[in-house]
Image (cartoon, coloured by chain):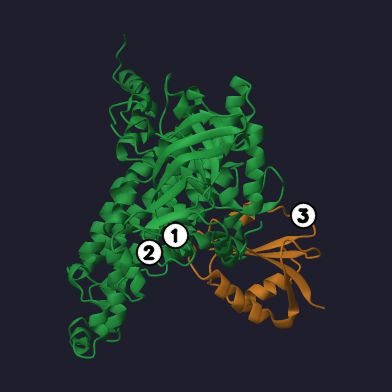
Chain colours: A green, B orange
């Protein structure tokens, strides 16, 4: 692994100079920009924890390709145990960051491609798998962070890619050359984009005949000419610039630091192309990537919920309500919801299966069920956190008010809770709760890894309704 | 002569206690009697596995050979000195 430490990671970010805009201005150095530092710190945890003996069992793996010890975020799942360890690892890291650490998206892209390129070659006689293995070996060796580039802007959702008024609303091949392809389009809300090394673009949905130009998978370094990243605005993000307590979690991000990535005629050589027009495999790739990504959410959001639950309990303790029976009951409900989502992630992993390529794949129905629960339970956990925290979550004075020589004494006096806990300590925990349970953090739970409806479509497909009808007929002794 | 003992932690997904802090207590109790090594090293007869919960993920996956025994810790309730005694004894764990 060439990138081992946080320092190595930051150095690697400095070395590559992608074109990034923040608030309409070009970013000079992404590794020192105050808006990106929290996200860099979060992603850096995936490197730092891998070096710690007490965490290496989850953060590292032995490469099935080279036999070398690698970072798990570049590993291909070789067993059910690997699938479970992935979920355990995500919960662990979330305890450290209390936010998204971004690296699972690229991880899932690598695994989805490993199994899908193998089967594409088997059917079409192409050479994608061999090409992909070579690429993967380099990613494992360098320990690069990869953006999983799936979501296209999609324009008019009622129309197919080739029917759009503007053909660039789905990322596409505009030219095929002897030495590679030229790509145009965009990928929306790309997690960890500004602090990654490469992006793996994939089709955003199942493609049909006529959409061949849109069935493209390619790995592209972020500093490739023609790529522009536009960083997305998040709730309260500029509070982190103040270095005070108002950010709640000033060291790490709120979500993944998402960006809009624009591809303006970006050239990609053939050795980095892993699908080019095979529309019959686009749907399978999307489904696999989505399943692998939905598998994660009980791990990472379970871990983030653990922090929210802890903060809620502390907020109650600091205001003297922790012993109240209704508070205890609300905390129990939060624990129940967090463990339920975690159980879903573990279950879909435990029932994972081996694909033709040898790589392991989670149970798709259970993985979708897990993510679907996330779209509800994180909101409920946050609602209960607000209930326990009280209205003060919404009306707390500024950090600078507490520090003010003139009015600080009032904040100190009237924001105080129980004896033995300082006002500042109480404010810190209330701010953490406020920032973890509102705005962008909630929307990410709803739409990250696919909107709820995309999971319900999977229920319709995989839910075996016919079998369930037969069970009922048998019990009711209906013969037809 | 100091006994070589390999230390192995579980990954720590959701531990019920601070495994590193607990190991430090065991290390202090062991003093000079133990030379701590890792599984990558050689010439050790005993492995101390510290897991954060009852599942003890690493234990089931470790190969127990005739020359190697595993002392598995799943909580922080035992007296560290007692664990050291167990590590230094030659019997089964």
Quadrant where the C terminus of chain A sits is top left
Report the mark closest to the observer, 1 or 3: 1
Residue pictured at 54% horizontal, 43% vertical: A220
Q: Which residue is mark 1?
A: A94
A461 or A223, nearer to the observer:
A223
Report the mark closest to the observer, 3 or 2: 2
Q: CA distance from mark 2 to mark 1?
A: 8 Å
Give yes or no for contact between labels 2 and 1 (Cβ–Cβ under 8 Å).
yes
Q: Which mark is residue A307?
A: 2
Dot 2: chain letter = A
Q: Which mark is residue B65?
A: 3
Dot 3: chain letter = B
Residue pictured at 29% horizontal, 50% vertical: A443
- Residue A282 in the image: state x and y as whole percent: 47, 28
Dot 1: chain letter = A
Q: CA distance from mark 3 to mark 2?
A: 41 Å
- Residue A54 in the image: state x and y as whole percent: 59, 65
């Amino acid at each position: 692994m060439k990138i081992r430490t946080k320092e190595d990671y930051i150095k690697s970010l400095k070395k590559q100079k992608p074109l990034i805009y923040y608030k309409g201005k070009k970013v000079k150095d992404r590794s020192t920009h105050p808006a990106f530092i929290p996200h860099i710190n979060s992603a850096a945890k995936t490197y730092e924890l891998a070096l710690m003996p007490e965490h290496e069992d989850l953060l590292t793996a032995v490469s099935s390709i080279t036999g070398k010890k690698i970072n798990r975020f570049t590993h291909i799942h070789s067993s059910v145990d690997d699938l479970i360890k992935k979920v355990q690892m995500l919960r662990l890291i979330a305890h450290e960051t209390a936010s998204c650490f971004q690296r699972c998206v690229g991880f899932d892209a690598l695994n989805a491609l490993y199994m899908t390129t193998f089967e594409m070659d088997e059917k079409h006689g192409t050479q994608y798998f061999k090409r992909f293995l070579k690429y993967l070996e380099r990613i494992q060796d360098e320990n690069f962070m990869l953006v999983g580039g799936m979501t296209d802007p999609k324009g008019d959702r009622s129309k197919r890619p080739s029917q759009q008024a503007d053909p660039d609303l789905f990322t596409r091949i505009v030219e095929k050359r002897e030495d590679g392809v030229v790509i145009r389009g965009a990928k929306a809300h790309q997690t960890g984009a500004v602090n990654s090394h490469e992006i793996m673009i994939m089709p955003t949905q199942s493609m049909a005949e006529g959409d061949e130009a849109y069935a493209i998978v390619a790995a592209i370094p972020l500093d490739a000419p023609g790529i522009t990243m536009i960083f997305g605005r998040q709730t309260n993000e500029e509070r982190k610039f103040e270095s005070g307590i108002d950010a709640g979690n000033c060291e790490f991000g709120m979500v993944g630091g998402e960006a809009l990535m624009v591809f303006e005629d970006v050239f990609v050589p053939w050795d980095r192309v892993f699908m080019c027009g095979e529309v019959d495999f686009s749907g399978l790739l999307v489904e696999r990537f989505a399943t692998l990504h939905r598998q994660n959410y009980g791990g990472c959001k379970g871990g983030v919920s653990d922090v929210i639950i802890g903060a809620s309990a502390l907020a109650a303790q600091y205001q003297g309500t922790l012993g109240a029976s209704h508070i205890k009951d609300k905390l129990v409900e939060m624990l129940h919801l967090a463990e339920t989502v975690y159980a879903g992630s573990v279950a879909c992993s435990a029932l994972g299966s081996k694909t033709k390529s040898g790589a392991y794949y989670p149970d798709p129905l259970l993985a979708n069920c897990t993510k679907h629960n996330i779209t509800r339970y994180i909101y409920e956990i946050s609602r209960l956190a607000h209930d326990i925290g009280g209205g003060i979550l919404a009306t707390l004075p500024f950090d600078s008010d507490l520090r003010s020589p003139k009015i600080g004494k009032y904040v100190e006096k009237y924001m105080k809770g129980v004896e033995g806990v300082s006002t500042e300590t109480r404010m810190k925990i209330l701010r953490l709760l406020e920032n973890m349970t509102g705005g962008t953090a909630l929307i990410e739970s709803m739409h990250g890894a696919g909107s709820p409806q995309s999971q319900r479509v999977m229920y319709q497909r995989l839910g075996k309704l016919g079998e369930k009808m037969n069970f009922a007929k048998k019990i009711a002794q209906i013969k037809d | 002569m100091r006994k070589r003992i390999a230390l192995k932690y579980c990954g720590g997904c959701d531990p019920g206690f601070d495994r590193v802090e607990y190991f430090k207590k065991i290390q202090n109790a062991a003093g000079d009697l133990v030379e701590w090594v890792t599984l990558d090293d050689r010439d050790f007869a005993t492995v101390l596995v510290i897991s954060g919960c009852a599942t003890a993920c690493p234990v089931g996956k470790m190969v127990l050979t005739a020359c190697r025994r595993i002392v598995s810790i799943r909580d922080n309730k035992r007296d560290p000195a007692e664990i050291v005694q167990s590590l230094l004894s030659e019997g089964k764990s």
